[in-house]
Image (cartoon, rainbow, N blue to C red):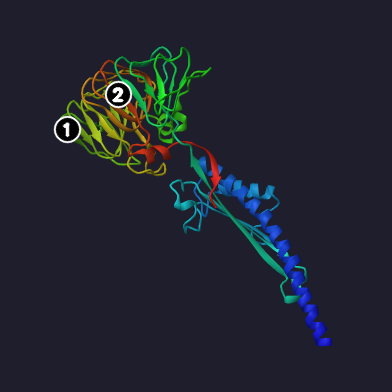
Amino acid sequence: MIPLLAFGIVAIIAIAALSVDVGYWRYQQRLEQSAADAGAIAGAIRAYYPTTAGSPAPAEVISAAQTATSGNYFTDDNGVGVTKVTVNEPPANNTPPNAMATPYAAGAVEVIVSKRQPTFFSAIFNRPYQTITARAVAARVPDEITQCLTQLDPNSGLTLNAGNVDAVKCNVATNGAVYVKRGIDANKVIYHGNAPGASISKNGKTVAPVLSKTLVVDPCFKITGCNYLQNTPIPPLTASAINAAGRAIISGAGFPAHNVVTNCCVGAVNFTPGLYYIYGGISGAITGTGVTIVNVDGQLASGASVITAPSTFGPPDNAPSAGVAFYQPPSNTNDITNNGVPDTFVGLFYAPTAQFRSNGKLDNFGNLVIGGFQTNGNKTLTIDPSQNAALPLQQSQTTTHVALTE
């Protein structure tokens, strides 16, 4: 009877350990998971802002994540006690599916919370404690492009005297008068001031315009590449600038370097990938893939301008202007004219104080921010964020939130 009783007691304790100890550990793991989630979100938010270099993550990111886990009652004790909070950016575990397998992996933060939990009945089995671990990964999530045509000058407008606007699955926002002879096809038209003098439709159905009680704001701050250019000092024109006179090809330093160009583009010129600051305006046909043009001063008056945005998206150290095809600083108010063949700017075309005047055939943009737009020809103005450079432009959007991915 004694051996049977001993065996029974052990069995009862094992059952108690399974129900009480494991149940307690599962409860603690749930608390740890909440702390890890909070830490990952806080770390990913902090990673968006400038940080110092560090491994396994910048010190600022580690501090933000550990502060959040501490607020959830799991404070890192530097590994000398019972609680450890590990922060990795990027995640140490790079096995899909996880945040690093997504297009938005930049700034993904992994937080692992582990803590020694006490044992009760299972201590009889020589288990003084049980280490419980929880893991979370959060990543920045870009906002989708919903506004693809922005007209900013309230004293100007969006005027197509004989044509139409095709905003592909996106919105049009205007501050000035709107008159489009053949109508606007867009998800939504947001206007400030007088109601648009144009028919508006979506998928063939009439859509009412939406009044904005305040002026439509310049969206540059929401686009990482544009925001970079707006906050980066323009390099001066020096004797070492590239003289583009008579050249058919301009080869400059690629990202992250920049190039200064003068005497640009009376004829047709192709640019190799890179960031180019152009002085003196542009009067010829310019082409290029992986190119960002900054029109520092002077006009853009080209017969055929075809520029595609950087073909691959990278962090600021290798493609700071990713997604931006053409950038004209607000200080440059010179008009943009094209009376020849179509302009095609795959990516963001940004000229917030300029008037775009065109009498040629249709024009194409990935995203258009302009002071005013006017054409007299029977043409279509197409703004299509989903063209073949959509990923760089989409990824360049400033993120306003982070999301848990694991």
Q: Nearer the viewer, mark 1 or mark 2?
A: 2
The correct choice, above or below, for 382 with respect to 128 in the image is above
- Distance between the alpha carbons at the discs numbered 1 and 2: 32 Å
Q: Amino acid type of disc 1?
A: Arg
The correct choice, above or below, for 195 with respect to 290 in the image is above
State the residue lying farthest toward the left: 246
Sequence-wise first label, 1 or 2: 1
Closer to the camera in the image, 8 or 370 = 8
Query: Is residue 2 visible to the viewer in this orientation of the structure?
Result: yes
What residue do we see at 42% from left, 44% from top? 315
- For disc 2, the neighbor class at 10 Å (few under 14, some 14 to 19, many from 20) is some
- Lateral position of residue 401 relative to residue 293, left or right: right
Q: Quadrant of the N terminus?
A: bottom right
Residue 247: give its label. Answer: 1
Q: Amino acid type of disc 2?
A: Thr
Percent x, y for residue 338? 25, 21
Percent x, y for residue 119? 74, 67
Total numbered circles: 2
Residue 259's image quarter? top left
Residue at label 2?
A: 380
